[in-house]
Image (spheres, rainbow, N blue to C red):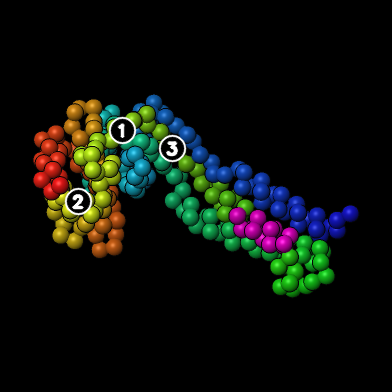
Amino acid sequence: MLPKTLLRGLTFLLFASLFISCGPRSQMLNQSDWQANKDNKINAAATVFIANVDFDAKIISVSDNKLVVAQNGQKTDLPVEVVSKIIFSGDQSKKKKIIWGSVIGGVLGIAGGYAVGSAASSEKGAAALAHPLSMAIILGGIVGGGFTGSSFTKYEEYSFNNELVPYILDEDLGPEITPAELRGYSIFENLTNDSDEKVLQVQIFKMKSGKFFLLYDVASLGSYGVKWQTVDEDYLQTQKAKVKTQK
């Protein structure tokens, strides 16, 4: 029969695993839910996803077809048709909760792990903590505590049924145009007017209106951001001609 201290330690590990399975409280919502709730999201902080790119922003205003968002104090219009999903967190201190949960779970895990290690072997002190059962319980405490802290944060995730159609500028370029390709072909040189700002990559999507949505990452003095522009086909034809002349 297992000693009582060992049983208590194993019980602790079981509860840690149970906390892990719970996960954060999250509401998965759709585009119709967004239409019903969008007016309540003015001035709310959110994480906005466009295809495989996400960025943090503040929602300034909303309409059926457009969002106005602010990044680093700059307001920009964003067509709703290019948005993949928007996540709102009800608690901006999520990271602190995860850290404190991990610390508390780790302390409890060490206490439980020491008890198990002492009961399962004749070793004491640090040697008892090095016992495999002790290490398992300590790890369970840390991970379980982190998930427990995370579980107190509530999310609202709005998924949009927007299927973005990638546009390939040239057969030699992929869907994500790299900085080397931008420099090598001298294309998209007017995407930014800031001399310190560098464009990291460009993606192009065709919109329902027939225009094109340029999505690009930028870096400036060690900080990173996401920008976009809406352009017409003539603009892209000019960029295509530049690529052909450089081949």
Q: Is residue 151 magenta?
A: no
Query: Is the residue marked by circle 1 packed among few (<14), some (14-19), or many (20+) residues within 10 Å?
Result: some
- Residue 205 horizontal/vertical position (percent): 25, 36
Give the residue pinned by disc 3.
157
On the image, the x and y values in percent for residue 136 come to 69, 58
* Residue 182: mark: 2
Residue at which label 1 appears:
164
Is any part of residue 232 visible from this angle? yes
Q: Residue furthest front?
A: 247
Question: Disc 3 on helix, strand or loop?
Answer: strand
Vertical comparison of 16 with 133: above or below: above
Q: Where does residue 106 sit, x and y in percent of width and height?
A: 63, 61
Vertical arrangement, residue 31 with respect to residue 229, above or below: above
Magenta stretch bounds? 132-143
Tell me the kind of residue under disc 2: Leu
**Nearest to the observer: residue 84 or residue 132:** 132
The residue lying at 26 percent from left, 57 percent from top is: 219
